[in-house]
Image (spheres, coloured by chain):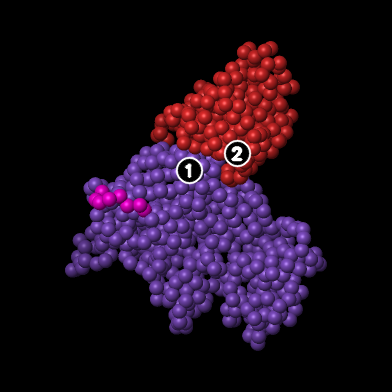
Amino acid sequence: MNNRKITSPVAVGVVLCLTFLLISCGTPSHVHTAEDDRIRDTGGSAAGDFGPPVGEPIIATLTSAPNVPPPINRNTPAKLIVNLEVRELEMPISEGVMYTFWTFGGTVPGSFIRVRQGDTIEFHLSNHPSSKMPHNIDLHAVTGSGGGASSSFTAPGHTSQFTFKALNQGLFVYHCATAPVGMHIANGMYGLILVEPPEGLAPVDREYYVMQGDFYTVGKYREKGHQEFDMQKAIEENATYVLFNGSEGALVGDNALRANTGETIRLFVGNGGPNLVSSFHVIGEIFDKVFTEGGSHYQENVQTTLVPAGGSAITEFRVEVPGTLVIVDHSIFRAFNKGALGMIKVEGPENLAVYTGKEVDSVYLGDKVNDLTAVTEATTAHSTTGEVTIAQQIAAGKVLFAGTCSVCHQLDGSGLVTVFPPLAGADFFLADTTRAIDIALNGLVGPITVNDQSYDSIMPPMSQLNDDEIANILTYSLNSWGNDGGRVTREEVAERRASTDRPPGAAH
Amino acid sequence: MLLAAFAAADDLTDGMATVGPGEFHSVIPEGKEDAAIEVPVFQLDQRPVTNVEFLDFIKAHPRWQRSNAVQLFVDTSYLSHWATAIELGPDVDAEQPVINVSWFAATAYCEALGARLPRWYEWEFAAAADRTHADARDDPLWRQQILNWYATPGSKSLSLVGQRAANFYGVYDLHGLVWEWVDDFNALLVADDNREQGGADKIKFCGAGAISMERKEDYAVLMRVALLSSLEAAYTTQNLGFRCAADLSEGSL
């Protein structure tokens, strides 16, 4: 048994017993190691009261994802004042798709709160006057009735106040608990509160806040316009979107997280649910440490960690090579068909001795090839009246490309040599626009030669894209990365869609 | 069932519709879960009270001006959307429903007319109707209309009253415009704050999912109950108005 696998008090007990047996069986000269520290009991809530607050009350710094407030750096318990405002706001959930979110602090996920174990938190929950609904807050870090929910039920235009002492260290979810609870959570009412251990967390170079949630809309995935909440889909746990940080573009393109080679990144990962458990994974990295379930002990060398709905994890990893790391829920259809995708751009000198380039290949194509029949049904093309300019097409295509194409062809269109063919300056792509439309519609299987380099890969049909979206992506690609221009119209795509046989499994 | 709007001679019942008598299953059962609620016949304002109507009341009863009102009865945002204590100002339409009114102020308004606020069961009974049915709660369209309003940000400007089709009883705007005070709002839920204690309080925190999904449309109405139960009688909000009701025997029949 590997006694690093510590995930619960029971497991800790088992490990301790085994350790004891080993020792009693004659293991010589037991040396105190860091491992012993790790399985040491923190003492829980009984050891979390460091007495009354010292000094003047402090207004807590709150941040919006992906940012995290700075470390505490305090040796004494304090009184912290947290002012959190509930707003009901219409915001984009995906490109061209609006949704009325209910938020803690105006963002999904809600503001990140950072306190120290033993702190006394005076919590002020304000419900903006424009709100339709009453709201409250249940912080999993609270020891007390309803996690604060019973003390914070707040009408629109009013403020509730309650105070609690943070007795347990860890990374905790908070959420609204007003009926119907599932609907309030499904509309985005969750966030994270970090209760630092008294000695603080080990210093790292970057800290980021990433929180997953599942969303249920009446319209299909990426169906344009304002989308309403769908209670029936929520009850059936049939998510329309699974997202990091509340919108499909929250962590891609210009919004990608950033780091430099040689740095250690700490991700505070939460999962608001309301329904789905996350198989949290970063493509191209291995978590050096995972504080499983946001607790006090870490597992090492983890590929994918489960983050329960209403739970968390802290992952830490050092980035060695430049490139784009892709954050996914490795329940992988969620990543490519429901939006659970984010990026970390790592900059720095190449380290070819470390990078093998194989992980990406295995992850992206397997599912698509093996189970085309399950590809999400194509989003319905909504005819928009009026002319679209090429500039509008390029702008729309850029966003769509980042979300759909860049994981393989890369954001700069350079592809990956021998694995994913390039689009930038690519003779194969630029030679025949009609063929490009067909490939986007129907996929491409088998050997091709691009710029004298041979590729033998599989591109799945982009069945989820409508005519507009394919036209915009191709127009963007023709006008980017030094390519010499061109335009693909919706009508051309529609014509090719109608006149080509759909391949088996493609959901035209 | 009486159908047409009741047109009476005096001021009180002018603009009121007759609703009931009838019985129905409320989202908040009274006593036994399956017991039907009996609703005696009553009269209900066809439209929510408007800004100009409330302004007339204020002029006749200056103690309900926002500058005069007793703080025990109104909070600080009482009538705060008006330009002054006695003027609506350019940003407020006379025919929008009045908002930012407390339960005390709404009650005083109705009492000044010889009327009262509707009780929850009366309000719920009247609001169960659509254009052609007394009880449309099994119709997905009825439910969707309510949910669509919930999903509209409250910061948008309010429509004027009476712009949508009247319901079965000739009553307008029970859904889709503003929340409305009811006389017994503070009796809807036990005010106890512990969600473990069950009973009505379960609705407040966990119960809508747990106890009402037998009737999937119920949660939409329960969210109204949740809103009402978050209020205190002096509270005012910018999406909360009211209309008056009267017992038919008090009217001019």
> Would you name the residue on which mark 2 appears?
B89
Q: Position of residue A324 (x, y in %)?
A: 51, 72
Q: Is B144 positioned to the left or the right of B108 in the image?
A: right
Q: Is A291 positioned to the left or the right of A198 in the image?
A: right
Q: Name the residue: 64% across, 50% down.
A: A227
Above or below, A472 against A236 in this view is below
Q: Which residues are magenta?
A: A53-60
Above or below, A158 against A47 in this view is above
SS under mark 2: loop
Q: CA distance from mark 2 to mark 1?
A: 26 Å
Above or below, A451 against B27 in this view is below
Residue A55 highlighted magenta (yes or no): yes
> Would you name the residue on which mark 1 appears?
A127
Chain letter of mark 2 equals B
Chain letter of mark 1 equals A
The residue nearer to you, when weighing A359 against A69, is A69
Q: Name the residue: 35% across, 49% down.
A: A81
> Which kind of residue does numbered mark 2 sit on?
Gly
The secondary structure making up most of the magenta span is loop
Which mark lies nearer to you, 2 or 1? 2
Q: What is the letter of the purple chain?
A: A
Q: Are marks 2 and 1 in contact (CB under 8 Å)?
A: no
Above or below, A222 against B135 in this view is below
